[in-house]
Amino acid sequence: MSFKSLDVLLNPNKIIPHYDSRANLARKNIFPISAELHWTSNCNYDCTHCSYGSRRKTTNYLTKKIIETLIQDLIHMNCKAVYLSGGGEPTVVKKWGQYTEQLVSGGLEVALITNGIAILDKHIDTIRKMNYIAVSVYSTQEDRYKEITGSKFFNRQFSLPKKIKSSKIDTIVGARCVLNMTNYDELYEIYCSAIDAGFDYIIFIPAVDYEGRGVFLKDSWIDYVQRIIVEMFDKFDHSRTNVKSLLKKKVKHYSNNNYLDGIVCNGSELCSSIKIGSSVFFNYDGGVYLCQPDIGNKELEIGNLYDKCFIDIWNSDRHYEVIEILNKRWSGGNCKSCRSIAFNKAINGHCSDLININTVDIDYFL
């Protein structure tokens, strides 16, 4: 898949074909569409804004045996895509490249969210087999970079695109920047540096305070970011960055709108995203979850890979029990900071014939 624009890459309507093929299936015949692996809590950075600050105090890994068994289960269950992501830095896991090759050989699309520092030349060919890679960038100023990350590899943050793209490939090479107390006033400079470095796009993410550590942007910083976006609006290539959506949402990662507003079909009583098995999340301690914000919350863990194989956890009694809990939360309007809200709204619009499948509406997704 080659990059066209963020509207195409992040359009939540991509869930609709999956919904149409799965909505009437029996629960036992539904397997996860995508899986996100948080297979370590260890990281080679110590970012001030990290959403998983307290989780990283434990340097846990999924074992080699657990990972290899999980990979085989995902292939056997015909999972479509795997995201190697958060908790820690996925590329500090020994043999991460080999695991990626196994997933690709098994027919799965693979994406990597990384700071890029542990990626070596020997890994480049593996990355070129991925669907996309999203690399974290932090600042255009070396002293600020060190302040944010605690790292000395300032020059590496913009170096990967040219290495990966030295041969013709379809892999999308994107950049992600968390706006925090140190770099919020550099948004335009970081955008220019990322585009000049050869990234296909750059997404700006306001710091999300999942753990209540006070890492969110203050109102005065938000006002500054909004002013800069307005002043420089015509200088952005809006097919390659999300600043327009950021402005709409008043510099919040997730929309503040009540997600139940306008829901007239399937959304009021259940989470359609969960119904069709859109996602599953694996934590570094072996915990398995259905929603990203719940990772680490044992009350919503559907099973643990150290007790059972994933293929035995999925569609278990405990799985169904957690689905009931999450559906009650959804119907009560209590879900937040969840990407499935965008999918549910897309599905609802599709079912109620309020939007066309080709309509781009990414405000709830970015």
Image (cartoon, grey):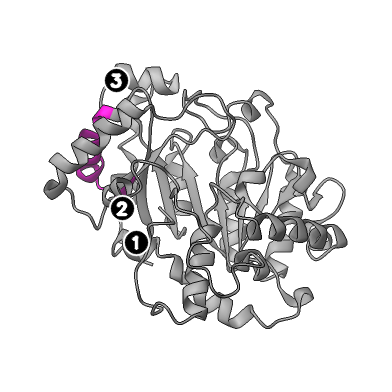
Please identify the quarter of the rendering in which residue 191 is found: top left
**Residue 255 visible, this orientation:** yes
Residue ID at (26%, 51%): 244
Residue 142 - label: 3
**Residue 2 visible, this orientation:** no
Q: Is residue 186 magenta?
A: yes
Q: Earlier in the sequence, mark 3 or mark 2?
A: 3
Amino acid type, residue under disc 1 in the picture:
Ile
Amino acid type, residue under disc 2 in the picture:
Lys
Q: Mark 1 sits on what residue? A: 169
Q: Position of residue 221 (x, y in %)?
A: 31, 27
Q: Position of residue 316 (x, y in %)?
A: 84, 63
Residue 14 - label: none
Q: Mark 2 sits on what residue? A: 165
**Residues at discs 3 and 2 in contact (Cβ within 8 Å):** no
Image quadrant containing the N terminus: bottom left
Q: Start and end of the magenta stretch?
A: 185-203
Relative depth, front residue between 40 and 189: 189
Residue at mark 1 to residue at mark 3: CA–CA distance: 31 Å
